[in-house]
Image (cartoon, rainbow, N blue to C red):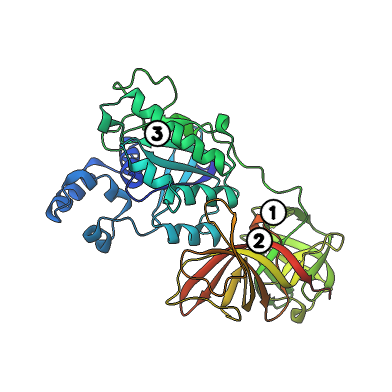
Amino acid sequence: MANKDHLNLIVTGHIDNGKSTTMGHFLMDLGVVDERTIEAHAKASEETGKGDTFKYAWVMDNIKDERERGITIDLAFQKFETPKFFFTLIDAPGHRDFIKNMITGASEADCAVLVLSAKEGETDTAIAPGGQAREHAFLLKTLGVNQLIVAINKMDDSNFSEEAFKVAKEKGEKLIKSVGYKIDQVPFIPVSGWKGDNLVKKSENMAWYKGKTLLEAFDDFKMPEKPIGKPLRVPIQDVYSITGVGTVPVGRVETGKMKANDKIIVMPSGAVGEIKSIETHHQQMESAEAGDNIGFNLRGIEKKDIKRGDVMGTPDAPPKVAKEFKAQIIVIHHPTALAPGYTPVMHCHTAQVAATITEFVSKINPASGAVEEENPKFLKVGDSAIVKIRPVRPTPIETFQDFPEMGRFALRDMGATIAAGIVKEITEEHKP
């Protein structure tokens, strides 16, 4: 496992199209979850009156509250291996949690499976305006998840008819093309999450299908390139003062690379210094690159010049600092409605700062990005919008386009995530 490349996989799709059943059965066939666990789930499932059709879904849904409702709620992290990769499976539950987790980086997903249904009428609902499959596809694309597999589930419903597959596939192709995926790069696989066809083993019921199983298709995913060629960005998680050593910040290199004696700049203070040494888990390192969690010692930087939420870069391409920026947000939770002037707390990389939504520029269609209304008076749960945000103090951020790792954020208030978003442009920059 240690020597395999690691990918984060997110599974999405409309609520009733069988995501959990499909992935639960997949994990069982792969031997990650044993039959006994599944049978215990099936028995309990029958007792709640759901019948045993939910038993595979239960692999992913093992929370009491979910059993009573028969709906996937929690983000279940499950690990599994294919011949080529080591995967962390992120089961995207309800729509809102999915968006929150996608944007707040619980799951910077590398690749995705979109589950559609071959059962008559079900895919129509899922891909209609307001349907979750449509919205998920749009979000995946907006958030930079460029590798996708579409699983056409419930093939057993039509007795594994090629015609039913073709009809659903055509609808699925239209959908993913409309949000910007290239059809020839997205495999469509006919499966039965309930019976297990084409998950791990090739289906005997669909001789007409000549393509790969879900397991085989997973190994066609590519490792995303680490953003090593981009300018250095290291959001600071903590800063320690160590006797005899001095100031030791720690953080994760999001983009670029760094080595001892490099010149650096810390934003927003603008303090300039150089890297004395780098270490990870108490091991000295000559250099560090995107993806490394490190501690480092700096020359010429005082403790007062660097704190959690700051970002380190190089003087020739310093991290941007925003006084105000334009963002695309989606409202995930609010008891009533948001009005301009609302000031929640913005969480972005390691920074947390109160931020005022100063202006609602436009309300947009979440599934296409088209403008629905200019300068809306308020925004409610489910709305997507372009807004202007002004943090109470200048904050280092980047546009999502240039640095996805530094350009997604969540707005929180009263212990809940109110909205999630991505930075579109920095409208007013702070220069130290």
The answer to whether one can see residue 286 in this image is no
Q: x, y percentage for residue 267?
A: 77, 71
Judged from the image, the secondary structure of the residue bearing numbered disc 2 is loop
Q: x, y percentage for residue 241?
A: 69, 78
The answer to whether one can see residue 190 in this image is yes
Q: Is residue 425 left or right of residue 63?
A: right
Instruction: Inspect the image, locate mark 2, and give the three-letter code of the amino acid beneath it.
Output: Gly
Q: Which residue is mark 2?
A: 407
Judged from the image, the secondary structure of the residue bearing numbered disc 1 is loop
Q: Which residue is more in the foreground, 406 or 255? A: 406
- At 68% from the left and 58% from the top, the residue drawn is 253
Q: Which residue is mark 1?
A: 401
Instruction: Inspect the image, locate mark 3, and give the three-letter code of the amino acid beneath it.
Output: Ala
Label 1 close to label 2 by CB (< 8 Å)? yes
Tell me if residue 121 comes above or below residue 90 in the rendering: above
Separation (CA) of disc 3 from disc 1 = 33 Å
User: Foreground mark, 3 or 2?
Assistant: 3
Q: Which residue is mark 3?
A: 168
* Label of residue 102 in the image: none
Instruction: Inspect the image, locate mark 1, and give the three-letter code of the amino acid beneath it.
Output: Gln
